[in-house]
Image: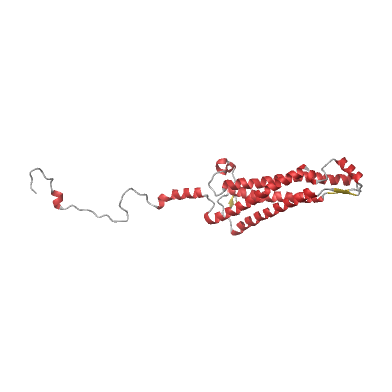
Protein backbone atom coordinates (compact mmCIF):
# COMPACT_ATOMS: atom_id res chain seq x y z
CA UNK A 1 0.00 0.00 0.00
CA UNK A 2 1.21 3.53 -0.77
CA UNK A 3 2.72 5.82 1.84
CA UNK A 4 1.93 9.53 1.40
CA UNK A 5 3.61 12.16 3.61
CA UNK A 6 4.63 9.38 5.97
CA UNK A 7 1.05 8.10 6.32
CA UNK A 8 0.51 4.45 5.42
CA UNK A 9 -2.74 4.24 3.46
CA UNK A 10 -3.32 0.65 4.56
CA UNK A 11 -4.33 2.10 7.94
CA UNK A 12 -7.52 3.46 6.36
CA UNK A 13 -9.88 0.68 7.40
CA UNK A 14 -13.62 0.48 8.01
CA UNK A 15 -12.89 -1.49 11.17
CA UNK A 16 -11.52 1.65 12.79
CA UNK A 17 -15.03 3.10 12.90
CA UNK A 18 -16.09 0.41 15.36
CA UNK A 19 -17.04 1.66 18.81
CA UNK A 20 -14.45 -0.58 20.44
CA UNK A 21 -11.67 1.20 18.56
CA UNK A 22 -13.04 4.65 17.89
CA UNK A 23 -14.07 5.36 21.47
CA UNK A 24 -11.31 3.59 23.40
CA UNK A 25 -9.08 5.35 25.92
CA UNK A 26 -5.80 4.30 24.38
CA UNK A 27 -4.85 7.82 23.27
CA UNK A 28 -4.88 11.14 25.07
CA UNK A 29 -8.20 13.04 24.79
CA UNK A 30 -9.30 10.70 22.00
CA UNK A 31 -13.01 10.63 22.86
CA UNK A 32 -13.09 14.31 23.80
CA UNK A 33 -11.52 15.34 20.50
CA UNK A 34 -13.87 13.19 18.44
CA UNK A 35 -16.95 14.63 20.16
CA UNK A 36 -15.95 18.30 20.16
CA UNK A 37 -14.50 18.25 16.64
CA UNK A 38 -17.73 16.78 15.32
CA UNK A 39 -19.84 19.35 17.17
CA UNK A 40 -17.89 22.19 15.55
CA UNK A 41 -18.23 20.62 12.12
CA UNK A 42 -21.91 19.75 12.43
CA UNK A 43 -23.12 23.11 13.72
CA UNK A 44 -21.09 25.14 11.22
CA UNK A 45 -22.11 22.95 8.28
CA UNK A 46 -25.79 23.03 9.28
CA UNK A 47 -25.56 26.84 9.50
CA UNK A 48 -23.95 26.88 6.08
CA UNK A 49 -26.70 24.71 4.59
CA UNK A 50 -29.56 26.78 5.99
CA UNK A 51 -27.87 30.01 4.93
CA UNK A 52 -27.33 28.63 1.44
CA UNK A 53 -31.03 27.82 1.10
CA UNK A 54 -31.95 31.40 2.06
CA UNK A 55 -29.22 32.78 -0.20
CA UNK A 56 -30.57 30.83 -3.15
CA UNK A 57 -34.03 32.38 -2.65
CA UNK A 58 -32.64 35.91 -2.63
CA UNK A 59 -30.58 35.25 -5.76
CA UNK A 60 -33.69 33.92 -7.49
CA UNK A 61 -35.57 37.01 -6.33
CA UNK A 62 -33.01 39.23 -8.08
CA UNK A 63 -33.14 37.19 -11.26
CA UNK A 64 -36.96 37.19 -11.37
CA UNK A 65 -37.26 40.95 -11.00
CA UNK A 66 -34.52 41.65 -13.54
CA UNK A 67 -36.09 39.24 -16.05
CA UNK A 68 -39.73 40.35 -15.91
CA UNK A 69 -39.27 43.96 -14.79
CA UNK A 70 -35.94 45.17 -16.23
CA UNK A 71 -36.43 48.69 -14.95
CA UNK A 72 -36.48 47.50 -11.31
CA UNK A 73 -33.57 46.17 -9.26
CA UNK A 74 -33.64 44.26 -5.97
CA UNK A 75 -30.79 45.14 -3.60
CA UNK A 76 -30.11 42.23 -1.26
CA UNK A 77 -26.41 41.72 -1.83
CA UNK A 78 -25.61 42.32 1.83
CA UNK A 79 -27.29 39.07 2.81
CA UNK A 80 -25.95 37.25 -0.24
CA UNK A 81 -22.43 38.36 0.71
CA UNK A 82 -22.55 37.26 4.35
CA UNK A 83 -24.25 33.98 3.45
CA UNK A 84 -21.51 33.32 0.89
CA UNK A 85 -18.88 34.00 3.52
CA UNK A 86 -20.71 31.63 5.86
CA UNK A 87 -20.33 28.90 3.23
CA UNK A 88 -16.58 29.45 3.27
CA UNK A 89 -16.50 29.33 7.08
CA UNK A 90 -18.43 26.07 7.20
CA UNK A 91 -16.16 24.45 4.65
CA UNK A 92 -13.03 25.75 6.40
CA UNK A 93 -14.04 24.51 9.86
CA UNK A 94 -15.05 21.12 8.44
CA UNK A 95 -11.73 20.87 6.57
CA UNK A 96 -9.51 21.67 9.55
CA UNK A 97 -11.22 19.69 12.27
CA UNK A 98 -12.45 17.00 9.91
CA UNK A 99 -8.82 16.41 8.95
CA UNK A 100 -7.87 16.29 12.61
CA UNK A 101 -10.65 13.78 13.26
CA UNK A 102 -9.62 11.37 10.49
CA UNK A 103 -5.88 11.73 11.11
CA UNK A 104 -6.37 10.86 14.78
CA UNK A 105 -8.65 7.98 13.86
CA UNK A 106 -6.43 6.33 11.23
CA UNK A 107 -2.92 7.45 12.29
CA UNK A 108 -3.03 8.27 16.02
CA UNK A 109 0.70 7.57 16.47
CA UNK A 110 1.90 9.50 13.42
CA UNK A 111 5.00 11.65 13.67
CA UNK A 112 4.65 15.26 12.53
CA UNK A 113 7.32 17.82 11.81
CA UNK A 114 7.48 21.16 13.62
CA UNK A 115 6.17 22.88 10.48
CA UNK A 116 3.10 20.64 10.35
CA UNK A 117 2.35 21.23 14.03
CA UNK A 118 2.68 24.97 13.50
CA UNK A 119 0.28 24.74 10.57
CA UNK A 120 -2.27 22.93 12.76
CA UNK A 121 -2.05 25.70 15.35
CA UNK A 122 -2.31 28.56 12.85
CA UNK A 123 -5.20 27.01 10.92
CA UNK A 124 -7.17 26.32 14.11
CA UNK A 125 -6.75 29.92 15.31
CA UNK A 126 -7.86 31.19 11.89
CA UNK A 127 -10.95 29.00 12.20
CA UNK A 128 -11.83 30.81 15.44
CA UNK A 129 -11.30 34.22 13.84
CA UNK A 130 -13.34 33.36 10.75
CA UNK A 131 -16.29 31.83 12.58
CA UNK A 132 -16.53 34.64 15.16
CA UNK A 133 -16.32 37.35 12.50
CA UNK A 134 -18.99 35.62 10.43
CA UNK A 135 -21.32 35.22 13.41
CA UNK A 136 -21.02 38.89 14.36
CA UNK A 137 -21.55 40.17 10.82
CA UNK A 138 -24.38 37.71 10.20
CA UNK A 139 -26.18 38.84 13.34
CA UNK A 140 -25.84 42.55 12.55
CA UNK A 141 -27.11 42.13 8.99
CA UNK A 142 -30.06 39.99 10.06
CA UNK A 143 -31.06 42.33 12.86
CA UNK A 144 -30.69 45.69 11.11
CA UNK A 145 -30.84 45.26 7.34
CA UNK A 146 -33.47 44.50 4.74
CA UNK A 147 -33.69 44.22 0.97
CA UNK A 148 -35.16 47.06 -1.10
CA UNK A 149 -36.18 47.76 -4.69
CA UNK A 150 -35.11 50.65 -6.91
CA UNK A 151 -36.41 51.64 -10.34
CA UNK A 152 -40.03 51.29 -9.28
CA UNK A 153 -42.38 53.06 -6.88
CA UNK A 154 -43.52 51.41 -3.68
CA UNK A 155 -46.75 50.03 -5.15
CA UNK A 156 -44.99 48.56 -8.17
CA UNK A 157 -42.23 47.11 -6.02
CA UNK A 158 -44.76 45.43 -3.73
CA UNK A 159 -46.57 44.00 -6.75
CA UNK A 160 -43.36 42.67 -8.28
CA UNK A 161 -42.34 41.00 -5.05
CA UNK A 162 -45.83 39.54 -4.59
CA UNK A 163 -45.56 38.04 -8.07
CA UNK A 164 -42.34 36.31 -7.08
CA UNK A 165 -43.66 35.27 -3.68
CA UNK A 166 -40.19 34.51 -2.34
CA UNK A 167 -38.16 35.50 0.69
CA UNK A 168 -39.24 38.40 2.94
CA UNK A 169 -37.52 41.74 2.47
CA UNK A 170 -36.57 42.02 6.14
CA UNK A 171 -33.89 39.44 6.74
CA UNK A 172 -34.87 38.81 10.34
CA UNK A 173 -38.25 37.61 9.10
CA UNK A 174 -36.57 34.82 7.13
CA UNK A 175 -36.76 31.74 9.34
CA UNK A 176 -33.99 29.86 7.57
CA UNK A 177 -31.63 32.82 7.81
CA UNK A 178 -32.31 33.19 11.54
CA UNK A 179 -31.85 29.46 12.13
CA UNK A 180 -28.57 29.64 10.21
CA UNK A 181 -27.30 32.37 12.53
CA UNK A 182 -28.38 30.44 15.63
CA UNK A 183 -26.51 27.30 14.56
CA UNK A 184 -23.49 29.40 13.70
CA UNK A 185 -23.40 30.91 17.18
CA UNK A 186 -23.54 27.41 18.66
CA UNK A 187 -20.65 26.50 16.40
CA UNK A 188 -18.55 29.39 17.72
CA UNK A 189 -17.82 27.91 21.20
CA UNK A 190 -17.47 24.45 19.67
CA UNK A 191 -14.80 25.81 17.32
CA UNK A 192 -12.99 27.60 20.15
CA UNK A 193 -13.10 24.42 22.26
CA UNK A 194 -11.80 22.35 19.36
CA UNK A 195 -8.88 24.74 18.95
CA UNK A 196 -8.02 24.59 22.65
CA UNK A 197 -8.15 20.79 22.64
CA UNK A 198 -6.02 20.60 19.49
CA UNK A 199 -3.34 22.84 21.03
CA UNK A 200 -3.38 20.85 24.27
CA UNK A 201 -3.13 17.58 22.37
CA UNK A 202 -0.12 18.79 20.37
CA UNK A 203 1.63 19.89 23.57
CA UNK A 204 0.91 16.52 25.18
CA UNK A 205 2.28 14.69 22.14
CA UNK A 206 5.48 16.69 22.31
CA UNK A 207 5.95 16.02 26.02
CA UNK A 208 4.62 12.50 26.57
CA UNK A 209 3.55 11.10 23.21
CA UNK A 210 0.04 10.34 21.94
CA UNK A 211 -0.78 7.61 24.47
CA UNK A 212 -3.10 8.38 27.39
CA UNK A 213 -1.95 8.16 30.99
CA UNK A 214 -3.88 4.91 31.37
CA UNK A 215 -2.10 3.34 28.40
CA UNK A 216 1.33 4.57 29.46
CA UNK A 217 0.92 3.19 32.98
CA UNK A 218 -0.29 -0.12 31.59
CA UNK A 219 2.65 -0.34 29.20
CA UNK A 220 5.15 0.49 31.94
CA UNK A 221 3.71 -2.19 34.19
CA UNK A 222 3.98 -4.67 31.36
CA UNK A 223 7.70 -3.90 30.94
CA UNK A 224 8.58 -3.91 34.65
CA UNK A 225 9.28 -7.68 35.05
CA UNK A 226 11.92 -7.46 32.30
CA UNK A 227 13.63 -4.51 33.94
CA UNK A 228 13.50 -5.43 37.64
CA UNK A 229 13.76 -8.92 39.18
CA UNK A 230 10.82 -9.96 41.25
CA UNK A 231 11.18 -10.51 44.99
CA UNK A 232 11.32 -14.24 45.84
CA UNK A 233 10.48 -13.63 49.46
CA UNK A 234 14.04 -14.16 50.73
CA UNK A 235 15.14 -11.82 53.49
CA UNK A 236 18.69 -11.91 52.12
CA UNK A 237 19.54 -9.51 49.34
CA UNK A 238 20.99 -10.93 46.14
CA UNK A 239 23.79 -8.37 46.27
CA UNK A 240 25.06 -9.46 49.76
CA UNK A 241 27.28 -12.57 49.85
CA UNK A 242 26.05 -15.28 52.16
CA UNK A 243 28.60 -16.80 54.50
CA UNK A 244 28.68 -20.55 54.15
CA UNK A 245 28.62 -22.44 57.48
CA UNK A 246 30.99 -25.46 57.51
CA UNK A 247 30.42 -27.97 60.32
CA UNK A 248 33.46 -29.00 62.43
CA UNK A 249 34.53 -32.68 62.60
CA UNK A 250 33.45 -32.89 66.22
CA UNK A 251 30.01 -31.62 65.35
CA UNK A 252 29.78 -33.98 62.43
CA UNK A 253 30.51 -37.12 64.55
CA UNK A 254 28.86 -36.10 67.76
CA UNK A 255 25.90 -38.09 69.02
CA UNK A 256 22.98 -36.82 70.96
CA UNK A 257 23.37 -37.25 74.72
CA UNK A 258 21.60 -40.21 76.31
CA UNK A 259 20.30 -40.49 79.86
CA UNK A 260 23.16 -41.29 82.28
CA UNK A 261 25.96 -40.10 79.96
CA UNK A 262 28.52 -37.71 81.37
CA UNK A 263 29.73 -34.71 79.51
Q: What percent of the width, then of the height, locates residue 20?
A: 55, 41
* 100 relative position to 262: left or right: right
Percent position (x, y) of residue 134?
73, 52
Residue at the image position 61 percent from the left and 53 percent from the top: 196
State left or right for residue 235 relative to residue 181: left
Q: Is residue 1 visible?
A: no
Relative vertical location of residue 213 with respect to residue 20 in this rendering, above or below: below
State the image coordinates of residue 61 (x, y, percent, origin top left): 84, 45
Q: Is residue 117 above or below residue 260?
A: below
Extreme residue in the bottom direction: 115
Colouring style: secondary structure
Of 1 and 113, nearer the camera is 113
Q: Residue at x 61, y 45 (%)?
A: 35
Q: Nearer the viewer, residue 195 or 138?
A: 138
Residue 18: percent from the left, percent from the top?
A: 57, 41
Residue at horizontal 73%, vertical 52%? 136
| Res 169 → quadrant | top right
Toward the front, the furthest residue is: 144
In the displayed structure, 181 sits above or below 120; it is above
Q: Is residue 91 visible?
A: yes
Task: Name the residue nearer the viewer: 106 or 225.
Answer: 225
Q: Is residue 26 left or right of residue 227?
A: right
Amino acid sequence: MSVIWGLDLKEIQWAKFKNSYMWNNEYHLRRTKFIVYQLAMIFCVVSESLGTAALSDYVDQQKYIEKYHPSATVHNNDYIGIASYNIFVGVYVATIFGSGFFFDLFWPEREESAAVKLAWRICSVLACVFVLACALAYTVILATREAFVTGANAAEAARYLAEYGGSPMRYRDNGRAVASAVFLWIGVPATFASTAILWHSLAHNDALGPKSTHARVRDSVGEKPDEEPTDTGSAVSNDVPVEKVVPTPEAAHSKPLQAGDTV
